[in-house]
Amino acid sequence: MKALVIGRTGQVATEILRRAAAHGIAAEALARPEIDLADPTSCAEAVRTAAADVVINAAAYTAVDRAESEPELAQAINAEAPGAMARAAAERGIPFLHVSTDYVFDGSGHEPWATGDATGPLGVYGATKLDGERQVAAAGGPHVILRTSWVFSAHGGNFVKTMLRLAESRDRLTIVADQIGGPTPAADIAEALLTLAKAGPSAPGGLFHFSGQPDASWAGFAREIFAQAGRSVAVEDIPTTAYPTPAARPLNSRLDCSRIAETHGIARPDWRAGLAAVLAELGAT
Ligand SMILES: NC(=O)c1ccc[n+]([C@@H]2O[C@H](COP(=O)([O-])OP(=O)(O)OC[C@H]3O[C@@H](n4cnc5c(N)ncnc54)[C@H](OP(=O)(O)O)[C@@H]3O)[C@@H](O)[C@H]2O)c1
C-alpha cells in the first residue's frame, strides 16, 4: 500500500514516516517547499496526480495564539486546503485521513466529549480546524477525521520540550491546573493513523476521538515530566485566568475515545509510557 503523507517535519508526520514501513506501507511525504497549504488548488492537484492508495494529512497551521492575528492564513491551511485535497481524493475513491483537535469544543462541563457532541470553538485555530472537518466530510469520499489533543514528541515544539528547557534555568514554575485533557504521544497518533490506513476504504470511517490516558492537567503533566526526567522543579498550580493568552483554551478537553476502540480495536495509550520513550530519545533521563 502507498500512502501520500501531507507534511514532513511536523510531530505527527515525522512519526508516520518513521513507522509506515513496519506496517507494510510505502509512505511518500509531500510538504514545503514542494507544496504550500496556503495554495489549496495546487495541493489538490498534487493529490490528484500522486501514486497513492491513501492520503494522510498531518500538516496544519498549529500556532494557536498567532492564528488570532492570521485568520485568513489559518483558514486556508486548516480548512480550504484539506477540503480541496479531500475532494481530489474523493474523485479518485481513495481514503483521506485527517487530523483534528479537541479545540473544536468550548471546554464546558467535566464529561469526556463524545464524537456526536456539539462543537463550539473558542478561537480562530479551533474554528478553522472545525471548518476543515466539515469540508473533509462534505467531500463525500471515504475519510477519517481523528481528533486528538496535547501532542508531544521528541521533535518540533511541544509542552515536554518547553518544560525541559525551563528546567535548565528554573527551580519553580507556575502551571495551569484547571485545563484537563489527554496528553498524546505523536508516535501513538501515527500508529492509529497507519492502522486506519491499512483498514482500507470500506472500513468504518468518519469522526474518531483519540487521546492518551489518564486525563491530566498541564500542571500534572509537568510534574510527571520532571519526575521522569529527574529534575527538581516545584510546580505550583494556577488557574487559566492567571495565565492570559491571545486565544482562549477549553478547560475541559477530555475526549471520549470509545468509538475508535469499538470499531478498530485502537485503545487509548498510557501517555506516561510515551513520555518515557520521548525523554529517552531526547537523552533527558
Ligand atoms: N500539537 C498539538 O498539541 C495538537 C493538538 C491537537 C491536534 N493537533 C493536530 O495534529 C496535527 C499534527 O500536528 P503536529 O503537532 O504534528 O503539528 P506541527 O508539529 O506543528 O507541524 C505542523 C506541520 O504542518 C506544516 N505546515 C504548516 N503550514 C504549512 C503550509 N502552509 N504548507 C505546508 N505545510 C505546512 C509544517 O511544515 P513546516 O515544517 O514547513 O513549517 C509542519 O510540518 C494537526 O492537524 C494539528 O491540528 C495538534
Image (cartoon, helix red, strand yellow):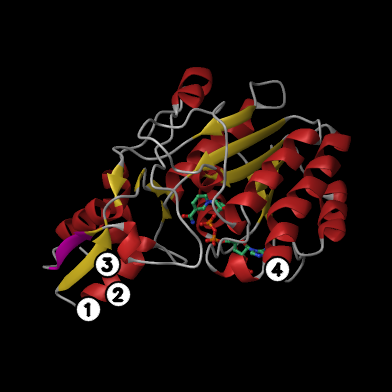
What kind of element bears circle 2? helix
Q: Amino acid at mark 2?
A: Arg
Residue 189 position in % (x across, y down): 48, 43
Q: Residue at x 22, y 66 (%)?
A: 174
Distance CA(mark 2)–CA(mark 1): 6 Å
Q: Amino acid at mark 3?
A: Gly
Evaluate if marks 2 and 1 touch, with contact meaning CB atoms under 8 Å apart: yes
Q: Where residue 168 is drawn, which disc sits there? A: 1
User: Where is residue 225, by image quadrant?
Assistant: bottom left
Magenta stretch? 233-237
Q: Which residue is mark 4?
A: 32
Q: Ligand 1 is in which quadrant of the figure?
A: bottom right
Closer to the chain start, of discs 1 and 4, is 4
Distance CA(mark 1)–CA(mark 4): 33 Å
Q: Which residue is mark 3?
A: 283
Q: Which residue is mark 2?
A: 165
Q: Residue at x 68, y 64 (%)?
A: 71
Residue 25 position in % (x across, y down): 62, 41
Closer to the chain start, of discs 2 and 4, is 4
